[in-house]
Each structure stands twice: as C-alpha cells, then as structure tokens.
Amino acid sequence: MDFARQQRDPTRHLIGITFVIVLHALILWAMVSGLARKAVEVIKKPITATIIEEIKAPPPPPPPPPKKIVEAPPPPSAPPQPYVPPPDIAPPVVQTAPTITAVTPEPPPKQEYKIEPPPPPAPPKVEAPPAPAKPAIRKGITPVTREDPVYPRAAIRAGIDKGRVLARVNIDEKGNVTDVVIVSADPPRHFESAVREALSKWKFQAEGEKYVGEIEVVFTLKD
C-alpha cells in the first residue's frame, strides 16, 4: 500500500479531530464540577519545612582550680635576752719585780774541719803530630794501568841502543793524566814523543785531589 495515499485518507483525520474534541470536553466538565478546584487545593497545601538545628560540640571541660600556694610560716623571732649585769672590776694586782737569774751559756760543740788534698792534675793532652805534608812533586808513584812506550825506529836506525827520559805528569782528582812534561832526555830528540804518547794513557789511583808525579823511563834495545 502507498504511504502517501494513507496520509491523504480523510477517515484517519476525522478520528484524530474527534479525540481532541472529547478531551477538551472532559477538561471543561472537570472544571465545572469542582474536580479541578480540589486538585488546585491539594497543590496549594502549605509546605511544612523542618529546620534541623546544627549539632553543637560539647563545651570544653572547665579548667582545674588554681593550686593554693602554702606559704611557710615565718621563723619565730628570738626571745629577748635577759639582762646580764657587768662584771665587777677587780682591784689591780701589784706585780713584783722579776728575779734575774744568771744563766751560764754552754760552749758550742767543737767543730772539726777535714782538709782534703787537692785532686791530682789532669795529664797533659798529647796531640798527634800533624800528617807530613805531601811533596809538591811525588816520586816513585805506581800506575794502576800502564802502557810501555815503544822503542823509536829512528833511534834504532841511528844506532842508539839505550836511552833515558825523566818526565812529570799532571794527575787530576780521578787519577787521569792530563799533561806530560819532559824534564830531561838522554840522548835528546829521540825518545820524548814515545814517552809522551805512552804516559798520557796511564791511569793512577784516584785521591780526590790533583797532584804532580815524576817518572823516569829507561829504554834498552834488545837483540
């Protein structure tokens, strides 16, 4: 069935209009008969409001009574002292002069003095003689390590079979030779260079100070 056709049906509209008219008629009848007045009176009844009081907290307990301070009774005052009459003053007593008795003093005890002999004199202090001073030039010194000089070839070619050289060496704190000085040579100008070269390599005992030593070197040509 078409829905639009149902809406255009006059029978349905008539039923609705009839229902509205009946409802208005009932309301009018109720107002005339007093039913509506009763409903208004019911609505107009006074509204009873109950006020609930606030619960108050119990009052605080009363403060304790103040303590009574019992004061100590004052000490009893001392009773008045009875009157004491002043003593009678006795008459003055005449003093007799004292008798002087001579006392012989006893002699003091005799003191004896003991004279002790004086202590013996201390022995004279013997000081060790000072160590002899070292000579400025030491002789006969012995090296720790040494190297013998080589016989010069020039002396061999010259037919010189022996020679003698006197030299002085400067030695430092560590025992090393720092300088060689030729004092004399026999024959001259043949052995000096060999002596300087050999003595410069010698090593002596370290003494912690510098000194000068004198050394004699003798050359002999062996067959």
Image (tube, rainbow, N blue to C red):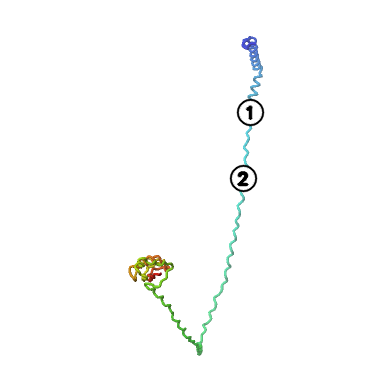
Task: Give the x, y percent position of residue 7.
Answer: 62, 11
Task: Give the x, y percent position of residue 101.
Answer: 51, 89
Marks 2 and 1, the one that precedes in the sequence = 1
Mark 1: few/some/many CA within 10 Å (<14, 14-19, 20+): few
Task: Give the x, y percent position of residue 186.
Answer: 34, 71
Q: Mark 2 falls on what kind of element?
A: loop
Q: Name which quarter of the figure residue 46 lies in.
A: top right
Report whether residue 52 is seen.
yes
Front-most of residues 43 and 150:
150
What label sits on residue 60 in the rendered view? 2
What label sits on residue 47 in the rendered view? 1
* Whether residue 169 is situated above or below residue 57 in the rendered picture: below
Front-most of residues 121 and 117:
121
* Whether residue 104 is situated above or below residue 41 in the rendered picture: below
Residue drawn at x 65%, y 13% as measured from the top left = 19
Kind of residue indicated by mark 2: Pro
Residue drawn at x 64%, y 32% as measured from the top left = 50
Q: Mark 1 falls on what kind of element?
A: loop
The C terminus lies in which quarter of the figure? bottom left
Front-most of residues 4 and 126:
126
Marks 2 and 1, how far apart at CA: 39 Å
Report whether residue 13 is seen.
no
What label sits on residue 155 in the rendered view? none
The N terminus lies in which quarter of the figure? top right
Mark 2: few/some/many CA within 10 Å (<14, 14-19, 20+): few
Q: Name which quarter of the figure residue 72 lies in.
A: bottom right
Kind of residue indicated by mark 1: Ile
Q: Name which quarter of the figure residue 207 lies in.
A: bottom left
